[in-house]
Image (cartoon, rainbow, N blue to C red):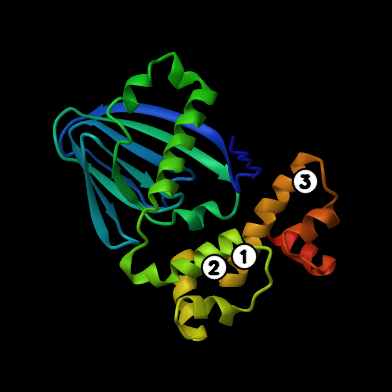
Amino acid sequence: MNDIRFSGNLHYKIKNLGFVEVVRKKNFVFSFKNGKNFFSFIFVKEGALDYAFSRERKNIRIEKGQFLFIPKLMPYTTTYLTDNTHIVILTFDVDGETFSSDFPVPIVKNFANGDFLSAFTPEYTQNSLFLASKIYDILFMMEKENFPIPKKYKKLKPAIQELQKQYFKNEKIDYYAKLCYMSESNFRKLFKEYTGKSPIDYRNSTRISVLKNFLESGEFTVAEAAYLVGFNNMAFFYEVYNKYR
């Protein structure tokens, strides 16, 4: 018999769940100039919509059988393209600094399966545990399918994966740049453009998210947790922790 074991923690936790189901007429327009203060999944049951993202300088059309992930604080305008367009919206926030870097852009995809929305009965849509389970299901699918990084940023993938998985290592920027076959200056610039953070800030925010999980477990002291995630200097750790807590 195979002895298979796993022990791990999520680097983010879902909170502030919401559910909305609406039907709109053709040409209905709604804008969020500063984006929403939460993440959204938009599922189309009937009809079609157009989403214009000024920051991304592109439009995305979604139709029946598709869903769209919209990052937090991303400005957009949506236009309903057909009469009786019927959508379901799941909203949520997260504890965990790295989440926005994991999924920083709008993503459109087909439903995981045809029966996904059938479970959203009035009884269940008011149940936080049910909504959280659906969101975790979708996020698992997103990670599993490894949604493509925009072509411009694909070369960063080895560094991002290394920073996420080996966050406890104290490698220099040049190490991550070499993983991507880039010069250090170009790597720094492109990384900041894609994630909104420097490579070191990205690593530190990941460390703090993991550290919080260690502390919540009650099994580690602050010093022990700091050491486990890669901080060898407690003075520096407290400086970083105060920045990201």
Q: Residue 24, image x and y in percent? A: 22, 30
Left or right, residue 175 beside residue 148 = right
At 45% from the left and 18% from the top, the residue drawn is 124
- Going by the numbered disc 3, the residue's amino acid type is Leu
Marks 1 and 3, the one that precedes in the sequence: 1
Q: Residue 217, image x and y in percent? A: 76, 40
At 62% from the left and 58% from the top, the residue drawn is 206
- Going by the numbered disc 1, the residue's amino acid type is Arg
Q: Are marks 2 and 3 in contact (CB under 8 Å)?
A: no
Q: Residue 172, image x and y in percent? A: 63, 79
Marks 2 and 3, the one that precedes in the sequence: 2
Secondary structure, mark 3, is helix
| Residue 196 visible here | no
Q: Nearer the viewer, residue 60 or 107?
A: 107
As drawn, the label of residue 197 is: 2
Marks 2 and 1, the one that precedes in the sequence: 2
Q: Residue 39, image x and y in percent? A: 45, 44
User: What's the CA distance linking mark 2 and mark 3?
Assistant: 25 Å
Secondary structure, mark 1, is helix
Instruction: Please name which of the two marks, 2 or 3, marks the residue nearer to the observer.
Output: 3
Identify the residue position indicated by label 1 in the image: 203
